[in-house]
Image (cartoon, grey):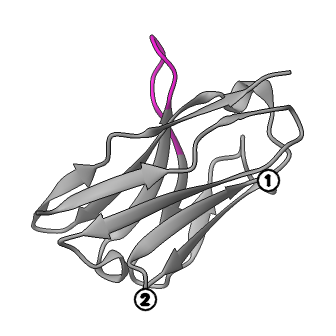
Amino acid sequence: QVQLVESGGALVQPGGSLRLSCVASGLSVSGWDMRWYRQVPEREGELVALMRTADGIADYADTVKGRFTMSRDNAKNAVYLQMNSLKPEDTAQYFCHASRVGRAPLRGLGTQVTVSS
């Protein structure tokens, strides 16, 4: 079964850190463009980070640049999102997404991040 499973979301205070995980099955993360999106109810989703399979380098939204880091572990077939200096506006459901030319894109069920004191 091809799927993405996110984990690591939690309630954290402003200024805190979290590490989100996305474990893939049925596909190799090294062969797909991997993304982290976030979604707040009644608002448009935001692309937070993208790691292209071609070079494994991540690009980030301006809203998270310098605070978030996306990484990939091919051995564990997973991607991660290290989030530091969290702000209340980072509160959202975070989704892992995989895309590849010629294949239907995939998205996990998401993990909730809440930043609040």
Secondary structure of the residue carrying numbered label 2? loop
Q: Give whichever of discs 2 and 1 has the lower sequence position.
A: 1
Q: Position of residue 113 (x, y in %)?
A: 61, 34
Q: Is residue 7 above or below residue 11?
A: below
Q: Does residue 105 appear to the left or right of 81 in the view shown?
A: left
Q: In this view, does 93 lie above or below 109?
A: above
Q: Does residue 13 appear to the left or right of 102 in the view shown?
A: right
At 50% from the left and 81% from the top, the residue drawn is: 73
Mark 1, Cα crowd under 10 Å, few <14 / some 14-19 / many 20+, is: some
Mark number, residue 75: 2
Q: What stretch is highlighted in magenta?
A: 39-47
State the separation of the CA atoms marked 2 and 1. 25 Å
Q: Which amino acid does label 2 sit on?
A: Ala
Q: In this view, does 94 lie above or below 116?
A: below
Residue 66: quadrant of the picture? bottom right
Q: Which amino acid does label 1 sit on?
A: Arg
Find disc 1 in the rendering and name its residue.
67
